[in-house]
Image: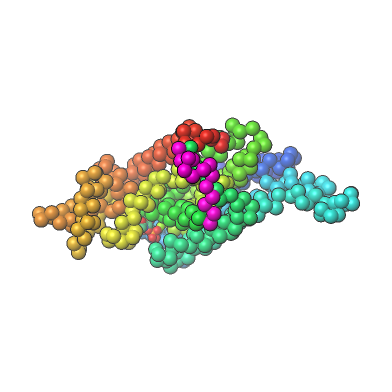
Amino acid sequence: MTTVLSRTEVYALLALSLACFGVLINTFQGDGEPLIASVAFSGLAFSSCYALIRWLGDAFMRRGFKGKDMCKLKQTEIPETMGAVCAMVYLLVLVMFIPWPFYKDIVAATSGGGNRDVMKELEEVDTGRFLHRFPHSKLASYLSAIISLQSIVLLGIGDDLFDIRWRHKLFIPAISAIPMLIVYFVDFGVTQVVVPTPLRAYLGELVDLGWLYYIYMALLSIFSANSINILAGINGIEVAQSLVIAGLIVVNDAFYLVFTPYPHPATDSHLFSLYLLLPFIGVSLALLKHNWYPARVFVGDTYCYFAGMVFAVDGILGHFSKTLVLVLLPQGFNFVYSAPQLFHLVPCPRHRLPHFNARTGLLEPSRVDFKRPLARPIAESLKLLHRLRLLDVETDEAGVVVSSSNFTIINLWLVWFGPMREDRLALGLLGFQAAVGGLGLFIRHRMALLIFTQDNL
Ligand code: UD1
Ligand code: MG
């Protein structure tokens, strides 16, 4: 990989950065315009991440952060763990952005011009001037998001360094989720769910899930972080699927901001969601540019966990965790489909990414050989899946199952549509994901009225 930026790249990145910087300076004239500032910060995040990935690639390789591209004829080594660069830039941008969403409140809470010393009224002595009007709880949400994301990045980098075991990896997102769950508890604390109309006769209008709701949110963090990591292995798929998810959530947020009259309780939480997502999109686009087929860098587990946690934090603190589940449906399907291998009902090889056929240059489903015969019920289930065209199973003359395609939707796609080139495979899966997620959102808002008495739009 060339570590120097081409002249065109330098000019383009400089132009973008300067424009964003100008916009940022301008936001000081009005109310701080946090949304516009967030867009500008995302542009800055994109250009700095783009340049850093390029500059740091070699340094990462020297420290051993590298991997072989297994789906290529020449398996050259390229830098890995570039997600760490994304995550660092992202976290720093989130920190620098802090004053903007609170600018208005800071002005209102002081006597103006940032002057906190002027005291006018006696009563203000008791109330600590107007500072009690400052939305500390919102700041706490924001800070807890940052802490949760920082801890997941630590895990990701640890994993890329030492290859942590799956059974340990699985639970770490739940620990990272604690800061945001605590803030959720103190600030929002709603653990009731609205019961669909047909079930109301039995359950009433609301059911309080209590602490079960916290378990649900912790599980959502575990799922979100790990599900992206196991839908991986071909160039670009980790980042691009995250961008599709982020894009769908942004569309959903935009619905609320455009169609609900302000001020509306949902507006603030969807703005909050955008503040977290826009810079994420910025850094991810910069990474995708380098990770798309033919990849010049790998993203590493750091990126997968980080991206998954951004969605979990966003959905939980933005109060739309159930909508989040809808846009994660393809990942959910892949998780369930992978379960027999993840839980070792059938053997799980270290890598399940598709097999590269050097003769055709195309990807084929990768397979797992069953050296020991499978238990009868498992073998029969695999044969059933084969008949349903949900798996490609090979049997010997005696009818004993000897091998099958690996249990990921990436391989399933190849079973369905035959061998294809790596980028076409990625595009197919992404199209499928966008369609399912889009349909999910559509159903969420159109059909909500069938099972609930009102849509919260
Ligand atoms: C997960 C998957 C594993 C898959 C791997 C690929 C499960 C349980 N684990 O493991 O099946 O093979 O991700 O990321 O589902 N690589 C490529 N091309 C790519 C991306 C990655 O060849 O486009 C290879 C590179 O050699 C890279 C390695 O995969 O070094 C990264 O694997 P890693 O992320 O460490 O695997 P896991 O997350 O443990
Ligand atoms: Mg991985």
Q: Is residue 285 above or below residue 221?
A: above
Q: Is residue 328 above or below residue 341?
A: above
Residue 422: give x, y in percent of width and height: 33, 46
In front here: 130 or 306? Answer: 130
> Farthest residue toward the front?
201
Q: Is residue 342 visible?
A: yes
Q: Quadrant of the N terminus?
A: bottom left
Q: Is residue 216 left or right of residue 33?
A: left
- Magenta segment range? 198-211
Residue 457: give x, y in percent of width and height: 56, 35
Colour pattern of the rendering: rainbow
Q: Quadrant of ligand 1?
A: bottom left
Residue 12: give x, y in percent of width and height: 55, 42
Q: Residue at x 74, y 39 (%)?
A: 30
In front here: 281 or 190? Answer: 190
Q: Residue at x 89, y 49 (%)?
A: 121
Tell me where residue 22 sits by quadrant: top right
Q: Is residue 393 above or below residue 448?
A: below
Q: Is residue 90 left or right of residue 83?
A: right
